[in-house]
Image: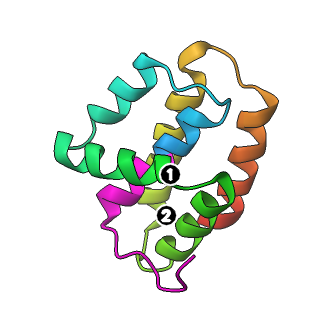
Amino acid sequence: MKNQKPNWTKSELQVYILLLCANADKKETEEELEMILSKVPKKTFGKMYAKFHKHSEDERLEKVERVIQNHDYSDMELAAFRREMYKIFFTDCNFSMLEKRLDWTLDNILY
């Protein structure tokens, strides 16, 4: 793995983290993917979806941790972002242990 930080925009990082949330229970539903796609251009979604599926779970979290440091998020931006994450988690009306674990991990990374 390269030690270089990925140079992703806030939008690209958002897609990547929302894909993490959709994939937390190891199954991305069509509804989750459509919800993510509705927030960004198709080109951005396609680019980040391809990158996401090339990485292992550990690599995904490492990349998020590195890229988040490239951006200064306000408290309002982080709160809005958390709401989007929870929408993805709850599309199936179930907050599984795997999703809870990822939520805790992302909470530590984002804050």
Q: In the image as oriented, which residue stretches furthest toward the bottom?
A: 3
Q: Which amino acid lies under the numbered mark 2 shown in the image of this protein?
A: Asp
How many numbered discs sit on the rendered protein? 2
Query: Residue tagged by mark 2?
Result: 75
Mark identifier at residue 10: none
Which residue is drawn at the image coordinates 54% and 33% (left, top)? Answer: 22
Is residue 75 in sight in this rendering? yes
2 and 1 marks in contact (CB < 8 Å): yes
SS of the residue under disc 1:
helix
Is residue 111 in sight in this rendering? no
Q: Quadrant of residue 56?
A: bottom right
Q: Is residue 91 left or right of residue 16?
A: right
Crowding at dot 1, Cα within 10 Å, few <14 / some 14-19 / many 20+, comes out as few
Image location of residue 11, percent across then percent down: 30, 56
Boundaries of the magenta span = 1-17
Closest to the observer: 36 or 28? Answer: 28
SS of the residue under disc 2:
helix
Residue 7 among those drawn in magenta = yes
Closest to the observer: 59 or 17? Answer: 59
Which residue is drawn at the image coordinates 59% and 64% (left, top)? Answer: 110
Mark identifier at residue 79: 1
